[in-house]
Amino acid sequence: MTEKKIDRQAEKAKSEQLVHQLVQRIDTHPGDADAYYELATVLVDLKSYAQAEELLMKALGLFDAQPATVAKLRYGLGNVYYAAQDYPKAIQQFDQLDDQWKGAGYLMLAQSYMANGDHKRALAFALTALGSQPKDEATLQVMAENLLALGNMAQAAQYYDQVLALDPQNGHAQFDRGLVAMVQGEAYQDYFARAKQLDPTYFEKGQKRLADIERFVQAQRQPKDPS
């Protein structure tokens, strides 16, 4: 048995124990809304999305007279749908959040639209989220990723630079910044070297994108046939 498999099994056992404890907490304190939220989070970690959805739907009914609690539970339910890759339902929940959850909600809306391939709308929500959390690394990265997807390389570079100023160890951002640099005709090898060291899994996944962009850059540099 590999070390990774043992670690996964240990994590699963720990999560299952936590589920048991939280169920007991709900049984003894049925008015504890945080217990429902925490239990749903653990169920998502266990990929028990249907159970997490059912739990939060029940909680929304129980606490419907408490607007602040409802907002938190809706945010949790949106995260359940996002984790389950049901992005339209996630968007529906995040769309109903109040001012307290606005920044986090807009970021999750941006991520949901991005995952659904709607980069223009994702960018709009990321920009709105940035208004209330201008130094948030995750929000800056979502901005950069959508700008990259839309081909706006100059602006993408600016946002990736902000992400890397906050966290130089972000291998994902290092790789994507290298892609932008390659298209822009700038030095890019150092970004890729750092990405390979910091996040080898993402670096390997990015090799196809890298090859596609290298072909694109070479095609752009070839002299056009005057005829």
Image (cartoon, rainbow, N blue to C red):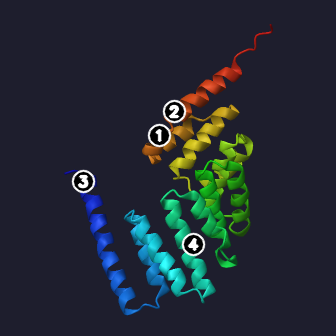
Q: Helix, strand or loop at disc 1?
A: helix
Q: Helix, strand or loop at disc 4?
A: helix
Please name the amino acid that badge 2 sits on: Lys
For residue 133, which quarter of the picture? bottom right
Q: Nearer the viewer, mark 4 or mark 2?
A: 4
Give the Cα separation between the discs numbered 4 and 3.
35 Å
Give the Cα separation between the discs numbered 4 and 2.
35 Å
- Residue under circle 1? 205
3 or 2: tag closer to the N-terminus: 3
Circle 2 residues within 10 Å: few <14, some 14–19, many ≥20 = few
1 or 3: tag closer to the N-terminus: 3
- Residue 80, horizontal then vertical, whole percent: 49, 66
Number of numbered callouts drawn: 4
Q: Nearer the viewer, mark 3 or mark 2?
A: 2
- Nearer to the camera, 82 or 184: 82
Please name the amino acid that badge 1 sits on: Lys
- Residue at 44% across / 71% down in the picture? 52
Q: Relative to 181, does residue 73 appear above or below in the rendering?
A: below
Please name the amino acid that badge 4 sits on: Tyr
Q: Are marks 4 and 2 in contact (CB under 8 Å)?
A: no
Circle 3 residues within 10 Å: few <14, some 14–19, many ≥20 = few
- Residue under circle 4? 75
- Residue under circle 3? 3
Q: Residue furthest left?
A: 1
Q: Residue furthest top?
A: 227
Dividing the image into 4 quarters, which one contains the C terminus? top right
